[in-house]
Image (cartoon, grey):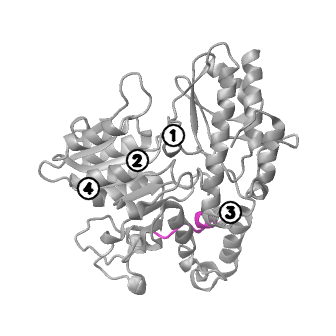
């Protein structure tokens, strides 16, 4: 498509957008009845308007039926989980029984490491990305200490080359081969939270498994953002939060994927709880853990129904919009953002933006990270004062992420115009 840097062209794209009506299903932050431009779906997605009704239904059930709501509510609580895994399995590319909705991201990662980080002999090391999100760093650090290892020895970090912002795929794969005899686990983010780089999860998985290691991914910035095929890629496990691109609310319940080959493996080590016990005998309360023969076997305690309801509200919107349609718009919307930002750069005597997010379509999702070569914090503050929600990361990066379900092409155009005026001031 031949883009144009005009308001009329952006409005034309919005008019032709098959998902344009879905913006009305979200509460857009506003001031004095003027909607702000929210480009922070990579941090916390917006609230679907139907969320309040879903929450109220659970409260009404609780008020009318108490604990009997698990069995006798119009939508029994015992079956609520089943309504979540179907939509999520489409989003992450797996079978419904390979998904479980539980806990939060860090807790789920710890639980998965109980099962999939099994150091033995020379195989004691975890391979991860340098400067992973801090929660992942702390999780891995404390988990290897629990096994009696020094994190400085047990954790191998892959980092960009000197002077570069992203990890070269060939460097990552070479390091897997180099440490093939020592690796117990490869645990990477699907997308780096800082740079927005999408990693080649399929190739990483294939090579790591050839080396004899287990493979898992933190999909916090990938789930609901890019196309995934966890089952077909043969990934062992993955975990993600649901409050970013999946719009399930602050502190939303998280989810995990476990490949079906492990569901009936009696040798699997895990931390157990009663909600992961086989369903037909769960209420007999007997000794001896017998896991559900699905990813639900990793569940621990009684689920938080209010959090389930908030997630169902968000997933219904995704289902109605269609996951393939969302991805198509995401690609076009982000391509237009790159075009507009290039216009900003070329309007200056010298480029003001260094893009640290890869430009190749398969190597980025919604997020674009801009390393500001001049006046970074000043530009960020000015954008926020003009009601653009973007994100600042030290020392000089502004992150923004136009989300296909509620952001528009006109908002992208407005962002470019605001940047030009700020730079001219």
Residue 22 pos. (x, y %): 75, 58
Quadrant for the N terminus in the image: top right
Q: Is residue 307 magenta?
A: yes
Residue 60 lies in quadrant? bottom right
Residue 161 visible to the viewer: yes
Specify which label sits upstream in the sequence, 2 or 3: 2
Packing grade of label 4 (10 A; few <14, some 14-19, many >=20) is: many
Q: Mark 4 points at which residue?
A: 209
Of residue 340 and residue 258, the one placed in the foreground of this image is 340
**Viewed as shown, does residue 389 lie left or right of 364?**
right
The magenta span reads 301-309
Residue contact at pointers 2 and 1, CB within 8 angstroms = no
Residue lying at 31% horizontally and 69% vertically, measured from the top left: 262
Residue 82 pos. (x, y %): 53, 75
Specify which label sits upstream in the sequence, 4 or 3: 4
Of residue 125 and residue 345, the one placed in the foreground of this image is 345
Of residue 38 and residue 324, the one placed in the foreground of this image is 324
- Residue 321: assigned label: 3
Residue contact at pointers 1 and 4, CB within 8 angstroms = no
Q: Name the residue under label 2.
A: 200
Gap between marks 3 and 1, in whole Å?
Answer: 26 Å
- Residue 360: assigned label: 1
Of residue 267 and residue 262, the one placed in the foreground of this image is 262
Packing grade of label 2 (10 A; few <14, some 14-19, many >=20) is: some
């Amino acid at each position: 498509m031949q883009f144009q840097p005009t308001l009329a062209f952006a409005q034309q794209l919005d008019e032709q957008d098959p998902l344009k009506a879905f913006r009305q299903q979200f509460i857009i932050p506003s001031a004095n009845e003027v909607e702000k431009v929210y480009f922070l779906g990579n941090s916390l997605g917006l609230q679907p308007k139907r969320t309040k009704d879903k929450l109220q239904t659970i409260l009404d059930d609780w008020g009318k039926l108490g604990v009997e709501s698990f069995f006798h509510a119009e939508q029994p609580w015992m079956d609520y989980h089943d309504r979540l895994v179907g939509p999520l399995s489409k989003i992450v590319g797996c079978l419904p029984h390979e998904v479980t909705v539980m806990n939060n991201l860090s807790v789920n990662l710890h639980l998965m490491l109980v099962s999939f980080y099994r150091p033995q002999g020379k195989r004691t090391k975890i391979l991860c990305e340098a400067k992973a999100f801090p929660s992942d760093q702390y999780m891995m650090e404390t988990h290897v200490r629990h096994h009696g290892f020094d994190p400085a020895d047990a954790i191998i970090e892959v980092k960009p080359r000197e002077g570069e912002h992203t990890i070269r795929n060939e460097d990552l794969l070479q390091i897997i081969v180099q440490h093939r005899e020592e690796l117990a686990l490869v645990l990477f983010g699907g997308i780096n939270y800082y740079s927005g780089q999408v990693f080649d999860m399929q190739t990483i998985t294939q090579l790591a498994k050839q080396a004899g290691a287990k493979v898992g991914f933190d999909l916090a910035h990938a789930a609901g953002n890019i196309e995934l095929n966890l089952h077909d890629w043969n990934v062992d496990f993955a975990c993600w939060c649901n409050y970013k691109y999946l719009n399930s609310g602050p502190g939303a319940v998280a989810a995990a994927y476990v490949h079906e080959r492990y569901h009936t493996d009696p040798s699997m080590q895990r931390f157990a709880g009663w909600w992961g016990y086989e369903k037909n005998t769960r209420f007999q309360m007997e000794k001896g853990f017998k896991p559900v023969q699905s990813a639900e076997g990793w569940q621990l305690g009684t689920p938080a129904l209010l959090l389930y309801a908030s997630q169902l509200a968000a997933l219904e919107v995704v289902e109605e919009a269609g996951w393939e349609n969302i991805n198509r718009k995401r690609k076009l919307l982000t391509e237009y953002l790159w075009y507009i930002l290039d216009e900003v750069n070329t309007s200056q005597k010298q480029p003001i933006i260094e893009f640290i997010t890869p430009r190749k379509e398969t190597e980025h999702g919604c997020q674009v990270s801009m390393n500001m070569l001049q006046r970074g914090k000043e530009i960020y503050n000015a954008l926020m004062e003009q009601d653009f929600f973007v994100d600042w990361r030290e020392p000089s990066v502004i992150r923004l992420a136009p989300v296909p379900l509620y952001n528009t092409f006109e908002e992208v155009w407005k962002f470019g115009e605001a940047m030009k005026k700020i730079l001219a001031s």
